[in-house]
């Protein structure tokens, strides 16, 4: 397509350009590559082919395949740069409604592009789709999206994701639960951290020592002191007391051991065992 742009510029410069070659280029140029699309649209603008620019932008908006969100977002950027608003709106609508929102970095690029363009309606639709991510119950994916959207300053979808995740996702993998706690804490979702912590101390399976230690550490770092204490008690009862000691906020209180009722043992000496 860069060759086509060169040809249009050359014919225009020597004064032999008419609608026939311009129309042929617009009808046949590939619409998938952002860099080439930008080059051709720049050439069309340069030679004053406003109508053909709009026609080509329409092709980009309606024909570009939606199998790569990052590429689609770049195409949206090209359309926005060239001021073809209607075509940008159409591609944005298709991107939000039809593309795969699996990759956190790609989703962030899309949200940022919509923000820059002031696409309130499409942002709302995007947030609705993002909220359905929670239905997948993939805690790692949810945490990645929370991280990426928070970094992009997209407060509304972060709040919605955090609310749904904290109250609804199954907590069957303590490592992923801990990862989600970390993401929500970093995003400032204090209420959702508290909700997730309450659920974690009651529901999270305590099957491995390393998992227990990771979750206790995440809750403690998040400031969920009550829930951390309850989880420490659960982990001790489950046989992971030694490991939970490593991340307890105040392991010194168990210096003399732990009573069957889960309280710290009273001080004793070896003489007491004589």
Image: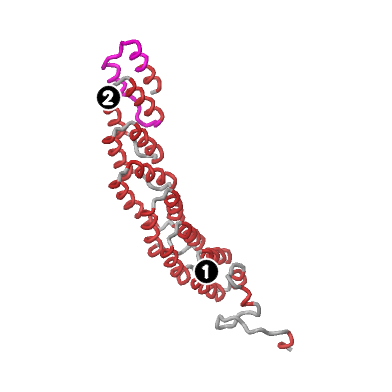
Q: Give the range drawn in magenta.
A: 8-34
Question: Picture quarter containing residue 259?
Answer: bottom right
Magenta run includes residue 30:
yes
Residue 129 place in picture, x, y as percent: 33, 51
- The front one of 102 and 145 is 145
Q: Which of marks 2 and 1 is nearer the N terminus?
A: 2
- The front one of 214 and 57 is 57
Q: Which mark is residue 50?
A: 2
- The front one of 73 and 177 is 73
Direction from residue 83 to residue 33 in the image, left or right: right
| Closer to the eye: label 2 or 1 | 2
Question: Picture quarter containing residue 8?
Answer: top left
Question: Picture quarter containing residue 81?
Answer: top left
Direction from residue 262 to residue 91 in the image, left or right: left
Name the element at disc 2. helix
Direction from residue 262 to residue 48 in the image, left or right: left
- The front one of 50 and 214 is 50
Q: Name the residue under label 1.
A: 206
Residue 82 place in picture, x, y as percent: 33, 31
Direction from residue 273 to residue 164 in the image, left or right: left
Badge 1 crowding class, 10 Å Cα cut-off, few under 14, some 14 to 19, many 20 or more, is many
Q: In the image, is residue 234 above or below residue 121?
A: below
Residue 74 place in picture, x, y as percent: 39, 36
How far apart are the alpha carbons under marks 2 and 1? 65 Å
């Amino acid at each position: 397509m860069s060759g086509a742009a060169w040809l249009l510029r050359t014919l225009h410069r020597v004064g032999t350009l008419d609608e026939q070659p311009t129309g042929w280029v617009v009808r046949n140029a590939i619409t998938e590559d952002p860099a080439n699309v930008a080059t051709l649209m720049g050439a069309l603008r340069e030679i004053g082919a406003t109508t053909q620019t709009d026609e080509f932008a329409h092709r980009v908006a309606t024909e570009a395949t939606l199998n790569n969100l990052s590429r689609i977002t770049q195409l949206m950027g090209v359309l926005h740069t060239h001021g073809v608003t209607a075509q940008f709106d159409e591609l944005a609508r298709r991107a939000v409604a039809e593309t795969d929102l699996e990759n956190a970095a790609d989703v962030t690029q899309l949200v940022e592009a919509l923000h820059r363009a002031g696409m309130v309606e499409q942002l709302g639709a995007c947030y609705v789709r993002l909220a359905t991510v929670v239905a997948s119950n993939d805690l790692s994916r949810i945490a990645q999206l929370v991280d990426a959207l928070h970094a992009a300053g997209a407060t509304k979808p972060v709040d919605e994701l955090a609310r749904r995740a904290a109250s609804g996702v199954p907590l069957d993998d303590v490592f992923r639960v801990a990862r989600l706690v970390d993401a929500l804490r970093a995003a400032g979702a204090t209420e959702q951290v508290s909700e997730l912590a309450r659920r974690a101390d009651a529901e999270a399976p305590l099957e491995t020592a390393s998992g227990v230690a990771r979750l206790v550490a995440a809750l403690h770092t998040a400031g969920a002191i009550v829930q951390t204490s309850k989880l420490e008690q659960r982990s001790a009862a489950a046989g992971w007391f030694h490991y939970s000691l490593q991340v307890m906020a105040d392991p010194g209180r168990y210096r003399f051991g732990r009573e069957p009722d889960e309280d710290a043992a009273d001080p004793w000496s070896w003489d007491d065992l004589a």
